[in-house]
Structure formats: C-alpha cells, structure tokens
Image: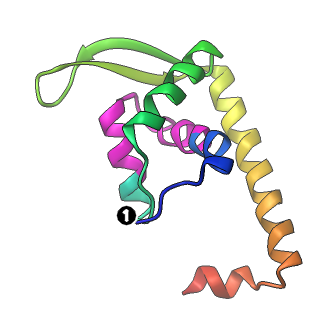
Amino acid sequence: MPRIDSDRLYGTLNLLILRTLEGEPRHGLAILRAIEAAADSGLRIEEGALYPALHRLERDGLIHGSWGISESNRRAKFYELTAAGRKRCDQEIDRWLNHTLSVARVLDLDLGAAWAS
C-alpha cells in the first residue's frame, strides 16, 4: 500500500485525521485503523508521522486530547475535534477538492470515470 509522500504529508494527513475524528473521539491507533479501513488499505500512515501531526493539531486548537482507557484496557489519549477543527476540516475538504479538480483538468482526466472504477 502506498505511503503519503512527504511533499503532501502535512496537509493531507491533517485532513485525514480531522475527517476521521468527525464521527467520534479516537486514540492514535484507532485513527490509523480508521484511515486504513476507509482507504480500503490503499494508504498507510506511519506512527512516526501520525503522532507529531496529532500534537500539531492539538497545539493549534483543532483537536483536544484527554486520557482514557482503550478497548484493550490500556491508557490512551483520545482526540476529538474542536469547533475550530470542524471548520478547518470543511475548509480543507473544499481546498483539496478544488486542487484535485484543477490537477485533473490539466492532466485531461475524467474523474467521473476514474471514481466509477
């Protein structure tokens, strides 16, 4: 499964994390699993990239972390979106979509056909 290139890592990873946390608070490993499951194992996020991203998002007030007990009875930090995080997620989805559509036009790609396959 492909990894996210470092050139695109921060923005894309931040967006994936924010979107994954829209449904419910999750700890780091649950975030990784949710991203991989949603991508049908088409993406792999390294823990070494995830945890610094979580710390940046928390520092920037986009997520809030609190300690709890995971499903395996281990102490884990659970993250949830803040109001600012929800707003940023929506903005980043719009930005990502506009960027993707622009690149597809330059490459002369039919995204409808590509997404249908």
Query: Front-most of 98 and 50?
Result: 50
Q: Amino acid at mark 1?
A: Ser
Crowding at dot 1, Cα within 10 Å, few <14 / some 14-19 / many 20+, comes out as: few
Write down the region rendered in magenta. 14-35
Mark 1 element type = loop
Q: Where is residue 116, by image quadrant? A: bottom right
Q: In this figure, what is the number of numbered marks?
A: 1
Query: Of residues 34 and 43, which is closer to you in this image?
Result: 43
Coordinates of residue 107 in the picture (x, y in percent): 82, 80
Instruction: Check if residue 16 falls in the magenta segment.
Output: yes
Q: Which residue is mark 1?
A: 41
* Residue 23, image x, y percentages: 45, 38
Corner quadrant of residue 37: bottom left
Q: Quadrant of residue 114?
A: bottom right
Answer above or below: position of 22 versus 4.
above
Q: Main secondary structure of the magenta part?
A: helix
Quadrant for the C terminus, please. Answer: bottom right
Residue 49: give x, y in percent of width and height. Answer: 48, 36
- Determine whether, in the image, residue 100 is placed left or right of residue 38: right
Left or right of 69: which side holds 89?
Answer: right
At a point 32% along the width and 47% down the height, the residue shown is 33
In the image, what residue occupies the spot 81% across and 58% down?
99
Q: Is the residue 36 above or below the residue 41 in the image?
A: above
| Residue appearing at x 60%, y 13% in the figure | 59
Given residues 29 and 69, the one toward you in this image is: 29
